[in-house]
Image: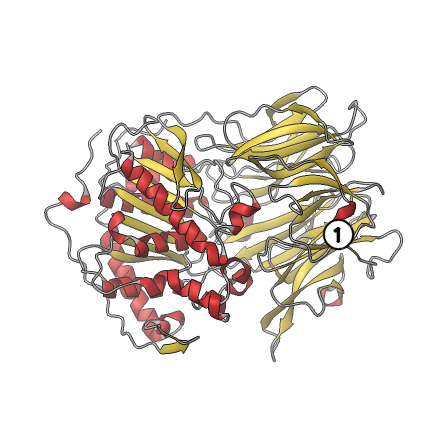
Amino acid sequence: MTQSPPRGARTAPARYDRPEAPRTGPEEVLHGRRVADPYRWLEDPNDPATIAWCAAQQGLYTEEEARWPARDDFLVRMTALLTGAGARPPVPRGGREYHLRREPGRELAALAVREEGRTRILLDPLDTDPAGTTVLDAWEPSWEGDLVAVQLSSGGTEHSVLRVIDTETGETVDGPVDRVRRSPVAWLPGGRAFYYVRRLRRGRDGGEPGPRRVLLHRVGTPADQDVEIFGAGRSDTQYYTVATAPDGRTLVVGASEGTSPDNDLWTADLTATSQDRPGLRRLQHGTDGHTAVRLRPGGGPLTLRTTVGAPRGRIVAAPRDAGDPGRWRTLVAEQPGTVLGDFAVLDGPELDRPLLAVVRTRHAVGELTLHDARTGAPAGTVPLPGRGTVTQLTTRHEQGHELWFAYTDHLTPTVVLHYDAVAGHLRPWPGGSPAAAPVEGVTVTQEVVRSRDGTEVRMFVMSPTGRPDRPRPVVLTGYGGFGASMTPGFTPQALPWVRAGGVYAVACVRGGGEEGEEWHRAGRREHKHNTFDDFDAAADHLLRDGWAAPGRLGVLGSSNGGLLAGAALTRRPATYAAVVSVAPLLDMVRYERSGMGASWRDEYGSAEDPAQFAHLLSYSPYHQVRRGARYPAVLLAVFDGDTRVDPAHARKMCAALQWAGTGDTPVVLRTEYGVGHAARSSSRSARLYADVMAFFAHHLGLLPPGEEMA
């Protein structure tokens, strides 16, 4: 394979003319510190100055994009790899199996229902919006399977509108209900009512979103007549969950402060109290830990997955009147070296004994085991196709012995699998897309690196040979926040890169959940520096061991990972030749004031607190930009419909880097319209991935081969 020379060897670097951005923002004294914010005016997307500046940035981006000869090749490969992507396990209800399905050539996944071996599309967002800007955010069938609540949003905003549709006819029988955002929907038997979460109206004209509440909605009645069940008097940043048992006996309500890893739980016996005034009793309150409930029919003990007293997770049986975790009985104990992910109950009459199916990860790699549901004793292992990831488990809501889940790894597209606990068979689910073979020409290894304080950090490395045979162009990515784990998953942006001779590495840094809740807490708030130290160690390992060479190492991050990329850029700009930050958090002094920032205080801390402010300012990428520093090539990508992370973060950072840099490397802003932080059409995903990897190819010196992907 032919590679272009490293960036530093190019003889005629381009000169980049940066659009003018006046440094007219304020300098404020915060907690005794002077803090400059020269580009605050860019926070207002409707300001004519901002609009003009963004238009000029788009022109600069277009010029830069024209320099990427590999873009079209990457786009062809990304489009092929994303065909049929996003498979999820079915939800069996009333003799039907509901699932998402993306047919080849279709831009978005549709809601499908399978019955008597035949599959039909129940709701395709493209029928509502042929432009592809409307997406299906969430859906939940009734217990009987004759109705399904669907939530759709447009323009990437994730401001969902809920409707109820009839499974037989596809007709809307209830709604629309606005001010929901991926709300949990907990049906009551009979399909005549459900509990859900909705935001109240606030403001003089009622146009501002207010606090969330748990409500009871009766199908066919106006939403303004819904009865408030829970949430009065609690803070605006409280999030709620709600679930019901299939027989309608038990209601469970959960509450957490923002994205806190801790939650509180209440239960109610709906056979003893009314549905609209349930007698909620505390199950867990003010406890250090997170607990989730798997509700089954009947009145026996509740089965819980919890980190209370077990940061890596355990499964317990809890009396329904137990408000004290001290009364919980451990069924499956915390296991050293692994993290509990999910569990399901298999209790069909065909089984000799009821079973628990338990998903764990060991250093981010999935395992699936079986246990006696009464005692927790080991009862076997379900072999998986490889070293990959097992998604959430689904079962029948009535007694049964079947289990569904999706499996993926770095090289294998997601496939839905069906496990029969009576026969002991694990096979592809016949209602899913045909299983695809793993991509050839790519080898995955797991490296161990040591961070600054000696902590072992694991990193997946995708390469052509599985060893550092020679320095190659390398892209390093990570996340490190909110307890989210970088488990193996099919990676469309990485595979063409490696097939072309590059290396793609994924660092499992602190702040994530790869090693349990303690791993998460070791990388949040005042410990955030550990996240960045771990990432630095991963980069140093790639250079020291010969995977990469100076001038051929790049960084990629998205959302919280975009913050990680921004920190890497400003902490050690000379280490990297190119940095891409997608939908990033970059101004950590003002992050709470926009998007969903107020709900992330538990993760990052608050600038209103003097000590936490000092930590935030110490690493805030926007505030760490220094005049005259030689920054690498930088691509900042944002979406105008993003209601999670305000695109202003990237606008301000772009202006700061363009002011600070020397002008011989590009700092460009890619703004995409009509999409947001999450779901999007397959063609838009392919274009984003292609642009990102073509940018890296140009600046790290990789030329893709001409052959088609296998």
Question: What residue is shown at x 46% (from left), y 52% (from top)?
Answer: 131
Name, please, the residue furthest toward the left: 11
The one nearer the camera, 26 or 250, is 26
Residue 197, image x and y in percent?
67, 59
Outermost top residue:
423
Binning the other alpha carbons within 10 Å of mark 1 as few (below 14), some (14 to 19) or many (20 upward) gives many
Considering the image in quadrants, where does the N terminus appear? Answer: top left
In the rendered image, residue 86, in percent from the top left (x then y), is placed at 52, 39
Query: Image height check: is 462 above or below 155?
Result: above
- Residue 163 lies in quadrant: bottom right
Q: Is residue 313 visible?
A: yes
Q: Amino acid at mark 1?
A: Val
Considering only vertical position in the picture, is 452 above or below 462? Answer: below
Viewer-closest of 447 and 680: 447
Q: Is residue 237 left or right of residue 36?
A: right
- Relative depth, front residue between 420 and 159: 420
SS for callout 1: strand
In the rendered image, which quarter is residue 294 located in?
Answer: top right
Which percent across, then down, holds residue 125?
A: 55, 49
For this orientation, the residue located farthest to the right is 272
Residue that numbered label 1 is attached to: 252
Look at the image and tell me in which quarter the C terminus lies: top left
Farthest residue, direction front: 453
Q: In the drawing, does residue 194 fall left or right of residue 494? A: right
Name which residue lies at 29% across and 63% down: 625
Compared across the picture, whether 696 is left or right of 359 comes to left
Residue 570, quarter of the rendered image: bottom left
Q: Is residue 390 left or right of residue 380?
A: left
What residue is at 57 percent from the left and 56 percent from the top? 259
Residue 597's place in the image compared with 139, above or below, is: below
Residue 422 image offset from top left, x and y in percent: 72, 21
